[in-house]
Every structure is written in structure tokens, then in C-alpha cells.
Image (cartoon, rainbow, N blue to C red):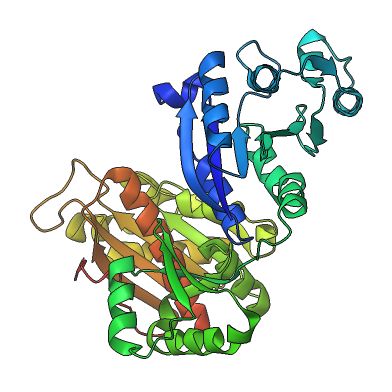
Amino acid sequence: MKIALLLTGNELMTGDTVDSNSAMIAQSLAVQGFDVAHKVTVGDDLNLIVAELDKLSTMYSAIIVNGGLGPTVDDLTAQALSMLTAQPLVEHANALAHVNEWCGRRGVAANAANLKQTMLPAKASVLANPIGSAVGIALHHRNCLLLCTPGVPPELAAMLEGSVLEALKQGFPDATARLVRRLKLFGMGESALQQIIADQCPNWPSEVVVGFRAGMPLLELKLEIEDEAHLALRDQCEKELRQVVGGFIVGENDDTLSDIVIGLLQRQQQQLTLAESCTGGMIASNITAVSGASSVFGAGFVSYSNAIKESVLGVDAALINQHGAVSEPVVRAMAEGALQRSSADCAIAVSGVAGPEGGTDDKPVGTVWIAWGGVDNLNTHCFHYPVGRAMFQTIVSALALDLLRRYLLGFNEVPNYFQRKRSK
């Protein structure tokens, strides 16, 4: 089932807002059998919105409109639908009830701006919005189903899982949901993974379609089938994959490295501590972003300066003077100091040259030493990732968490992450 997508908003045209909603829509609906085949973005221009909707309605059976449902004067979707379908805007009882209930939860009375969101084309239906003040709109033009959604990402996400999907299924009951298995990998790029599949899984069945979604820090691999009769084939493909790249597979679906690490720590009843320098607290931020992290994480230390490494973590000044802050002895001492001061069972410590300044011939920008493990089994390794500062911090944070994941799972070997790195 092919659908069109129309995004509205001057902020999208100027670049003030980066469009992530179209990706969310496409990814959410694709697994349900609805593919975005055409995407148009327009500014807050009433005549242009009407013209695009009229044109798209002759080409597609369904259009999802995103944006323009809010309380301000530049929210034009309802007015555009009124012009498109030659229907007057009227106060919609369900929309009014929604706005009053939304305002009531906040202890305020609906004002004129709020009530603007209750004025819909006469023949429109309401799409429930469980989060925001603006309801969605469902309306037919020609033989095309128009589904209008808010631009606020959390509101859009909630509606895609609820009222939008329900409306699409009611309108197109023959659409077939795909059966997709999503695996998350760290430390391997899509080209390397594709080559491994080609080389080591030569008898890959055509019924199992492979898809990739590149990202940082995790790569998503999708195994997709269109018929339940092929579930055994998909399971066999996954088994073969795990045999050749199993160590790089960190989780499934929406798992993050932090989710996986926290789960392992909880099952093993271990406490984690952190000693961060070049990542500036990013690892701790990733850990504490997960609900329940307090059960396994009590303390972390951002020891950015050498003086704090010495005074807070107890790193010997002589080690820093002799080897430098970015070195194996110092990162090991950082981990040992964090373990001693927190009484945790395992630790991660990182110290590196994030750049763009500060590199030397011996320790160029992108060099990082990482220590991980327990009191009696600390591992250390040096990596080199000469990328931009923000990306360096992202990679190092993920790399450290993955090394701890492997440690908790009993994997001893340090993998050849990303294959093109320089390792010492």
C-alpha cells in the first residue's frame, strides 16, 4: 500500500527544524504494510498546501499530513482542508471535549487559541491525540483518505501507534503487516556486514529480505518476510548470522547499549562505577537515561583535569607526569580509584584526546585509553578514532559500554571494532 506524505511548516523550509517526523512515519507504518512512496514539504502557505493536497489526492489513496494543527495563526491545516473540500469550518464536539479535557488537566480554561483547534471541516472525523491539545483530522477528498497529524514528535509517535494506524487499517483492510526481525549491532558498519552476509551466508533465501538502517552508535539489521510460512527460514537466517557476527549483536528492536548493560548488571547483582575524562559524563548520562539504573549505578566521576584525577580518584601524580593523562597506567588508576571510592563491583574509565587540539605525534587526536572490568580483572586497551569531537565522545561512550557488555557476558577478546580503526 503506497501512501504520500505532506509536511508543512516554514521552520522545515528554513532548516530551523530538522525533519525527523517523516522518518518516524515511514518506519512506523512500513511494518504494517504502508510504504511512503512520495514526500513533499511546503511552508506555511495556504494556497500551496491546498494545491499539493489536491494533486496528491489524484495520485494516492491515502495522504498523511504532518504539521499545522496547533493554536497559532500559522497552523493552517484545518483551513486548507476546508478550502480543498469546500466545507465550512465548524466547531467539532469531539474536538471541543478534547480541548476542554486537556486544559482541565492543567487547571486552566480554554482560551481562543486553544479553541481554534476545535474548528474542523464539517464532514471531518477526529483522530485521537492522547498527549497534545490538538486532535488529528481524518477526511476524504476525491477517493483519497487524508489523515492529519501534529508536528510535535511525541504526539505524532503516540498517534501513529494508535488512531492513525487504526484509521489506515479500517480504510485499507487488505494491507498486510510485514513480519520484521530487528537486530541491533555495535562495532560494525553496514558495508562490512553486507560483505559478511555475502561471503559467509551464500545460500541466503530470497524470501528473507535484508535491510539496514545505519546509525551511530548502533546499526540496525532487519530481516523481513511477508508470509508466516517463511518464519522458519527467517529463524534459520538469524541463527546463521549469530554464528558469524553474534558478538556484535547487542540487542533487538529498540534496545540500547545502556539497556543491555543495565540488564546484565541487574541479573548478576553487580554495581557499576565510572571514571570519565574525555567523555565528560556522557557514559553516566546514557546509563541514567534508563529507568531502573539506580539499582546498579550509585556513583560516577567526571575527572576532566589532572588535578581532579589526583585529588578525587587518587591517581598518583607521578603516573601522569611520566605517562601523561591519556595512558594505560592512568586510566587503570582511574578505574581503581573509582572502584575503591564507590565500593562498586565493576568500572569503566576513559581518558582520551577528543580534539580538535591537543594531539601529539605519539597520541594524535582521536586516541583513547579505556579500562573496564572488576577489581581483580581490569582490562585496558587503546583505540584511535580520528573523528569530530562530538562523534568521538559518542563512539567512545558506546565503545566503553560494549566492552563492559562483553566482559559481563564472558567474552575475553577485544574485537576489531569498525575494522578500519587503528589500535595500539
Q: Is residue 251 left or right of residue 243?
A: right
Q: Is residue 87 above or below residue 209?
A: above
Q: Is residue 25 left or right of residue 40?
A: right
Choose between 310 and 71: the one closer to the eye.
Answer: 71
Q: Quadrant of residue 119?
A: top right
Inspect this view and state whether residue 265 appears. Answer: yes
Inspect this view and state whether residue 410 appears. Answer: no
The location of residue 410, given as percent across then percent down, is: 48, 86
Q: Residue at x 18, y 40 (%)?
A: 357
Q: Is residue 111 left or right of residue 20?
A: right
Position of the C terminus by quadrant: bottom left
Choose between 321 and 23: the one closer to the eye.
Answer: 23
The location of residue 120, given as percent across then percent down, is: 78, 21
Q: Quadrant of residue 163?
A: top right
Choose between 76 and 134: the one closer to the eye.
Answer: 76
Q: Is residue 48 above or below residue 301?
A: above
Position of the N terminus by quadrant: bottom right
Q: Residue at x 46, y 49 (%)?
A: 282
Tally of numbered tags = 0
The location of residue 43, given as percent across then percent down, is: 49, 20
Q: Residue at x 32, y 88 (%)?
A: 200
Q: Residue at x 46, y 78 (%)?
A: 406
The location of residue 109, given as percent across then percent down, is: 89, 14
Residue placed furthest toward the left: 361
Q: Is residue 98 above or below residue 325?
A: above
